[in-house]
Amino acid sequence: MYDIYLFDLDGTLTNPKLGITMGLQFALKFFGIEVSDPSQLEKFIGPPLRQTFSEDFGLSKENAEVAVQKYREYYGVTGLYQNEVYKGIHELLAKLKEKGKILGVATSKPTVYAMQILEHFGLLEYFAVVSGSEFDGTRDSKSEVIEYVLSQLGVSGERVVMIGDRMYDIIGAKEIGIKSVGVTYGFGTYEELQKAGADKIVDRVEELLDL
């Protein structure tokens, strides 16, 4: 039994596909990289932005920073609201709170964006701690984010489980020694989550409460 549940945001609590992919399209266009269909960028939902721009699109470290800024020009005004809460999430979080569980958000997204999204969609009230990366690159890896959330809560990893849809969530949890649950209704496949070493994998929000 676990007392503390940490949730990823994108692909776990909300479906951010439209806002993120259009933000990526906007940033890449600045560098002359044309992507006619934003849905082609769906696979880049989850990893840290700097990693995506440098490793997947070959931008230099300096240009990756510029790309992140261009992305934020779009996302910070429009993209973060092009989003929707997955069906059943409100009910799941409310029931966990009723059971006395402590809930937190550990996301690669900048903390300020995560707070805005959670507040906008009426989810913020469920969480004791919300943390992500910072604009200056602080906490750019998932393990750093998870570790920071645990420090804010003042707990060890023994009572904690991380829930997320991508391998980065699972690997980050493993790196600091906590259990993890992968969800396939987001943007990661069963194979990706299994290979990363998820302790459990579920396909639907409803299965999370059963688990």
Image (cartoon, rainbow, N blue to C red):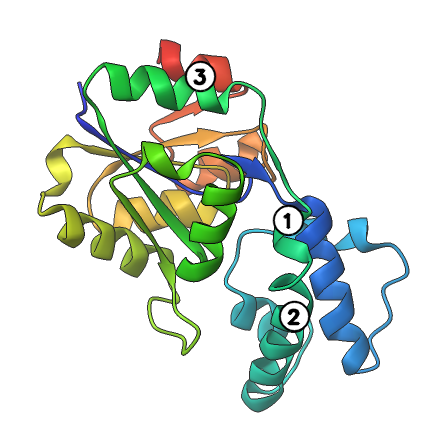
The residues bearing labels 1 and 3 have C-alpha atoms spaced at a distance of: 21 Å
Which residue is located at x 69 percent, y 58 percent?
78
Q: Earlier in the sequence, mark 3 or mark 2?
A: 2
Which residue is located at x 29 percent, y 45 percent?
173
Q: Earlier in the sequence, mark 2 or mark 1?
A: 2
The one nearer the camera, 202 or 82, is 82
* Three-letter code, disc 3: Glu
Q: Residue furthest bottom?
A: 62
Looking at the image, residue 99 sits to the left or right of residue 37; the answer is left
Which residue is located at x 46 percent, y 43 percent?
119
Placement of 90 over or under 34, stated as above or below: above
Secondary structure state at the residue bearing disc 1: helix
Q: Which residue is mark 1?
A: 81
On the image, the x and y values in percent for residue 28 come to 75, 73
Q: Earlier in the sequence, mark 1 or mark 3?
A: 1
The residues bearing labels 3 and 2 have C-alpha atoms spaced at a distance of: 32 Å
Corner quadrant of residue 186: top right
Q: Residue furthest top?
A: 210
Secondary structure state at the residue bearing disc 3: helix
* Three-letter code, disc 2: Tyr
Q: Which residue is mark 2?
A: 71
Q: Which residue is mark 3?
A: 91
